[in-house]
Image (spheres, helix red, strand yellow):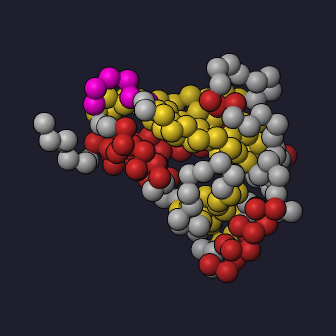
Amino acid sequence: MELSGVIVGRRTEGRLRRTLAAAEAAELSYDHPGSTLREGSIPGVADRWFALEVRGELAVAAAALRRWVPHSGIRARIHPTNAAIEVGATLLVVAPFGPFEMAVPDRIVAVVDEPTRFGFAYGTLAGHAEAGEELFLAEQVAQSRLRLTVRVHARPATLSARLGAPLVTLLQRVAARRYLNAWAAEIEGWPEPAS
């Protein structure tokens, strides 16, 4: 079953609905859900951390994450557009690459909603070129200071991903930095709280 196929041009809403329906019926393509929230790494699985400290409040960071702002950094859109951040939610990350578009199926496997931390991890589904998960986490580290983290636990799931591993690693690094920069710009662009 091909869920994350690359096509020329943009997908129609009907095609997105069909791809999402197939994703909802798919299983996770890896066996370590929630691993990006735990310490340590997993043998055979790349563990990549990207972090950025910014001025801001956790409520603003959480609101931006609920609106999928980090994904705007890679010009991706989320389908469905109102996808809730809740365990079990299935979604497509639809990203353009020049004249091509890729729809990547993911399922939210963990949510963190605590007084000093907010975030989620989503995992890959059957049909994804990678097998693993990605974490987006905001943590209050001091008054009006946040640490934004993107963490990836993944390995290639297809022959093309294995052959292109150096390129995939580079693309993950670029995407993570763009996620963080878009998220930070949204947080720091909000007005300062009244004192």
Quadrant, the C terminus: top left
Residue at 76% across, 24% down: 42
Q: Is residue 81 left or right of residue 147?
A: right
Where does residue 146 sit, x and y in percent of width and height?
37, 31
Q: Is 88 in front, or is 40?
A: 88
Q: Residue furthest left?
A: 195
Q: Is residue 162 left or right of residue 10?
A: right
Q: Is residue 12 left or right of residue 74?
A: right
Residue at 60% across, 62% down: 94
Q: Residue furthest front?
A: 115
Residue 143 within the magenta-colored segment of the rendering: yes
Q: In the displayed structure, would residue 50 be above or below residue 184?
A: above
Residue at 70% across, 30% down: 35
Where does residue 11 sit, x and y in percent of width and height?
63, 75
Residue at 83% across, 52% down: 27
Quadrant, the N terminus: bottom right
- In magenta, the rendered stretch is 139-144
What is the chief secondary structure element of the magenta stretch? strand
Q: Quadrant of residue 14?
A: bottom right
Evaluate whether residue 73 shows in this view: no
Q: In the displayed structure, would residue 133 be above or below residue 108?
A: above
Residue 175 within the magenta-colored segment of the rendering: no
Q: In the displayed structure, would residue 157 be above or below residue 55?
A: below
Q: Is residue 16 left or right of residue 189?
A: right
Where does residue 37 sit, x and y in percent of width and height?
62, 29
Where does residue 78 sit, x and y in percent of width and height?
56, 61
Q: Is 142 in front, or is 23?
A: 142
Q: Is 63 in front, or is 114?
A: 114
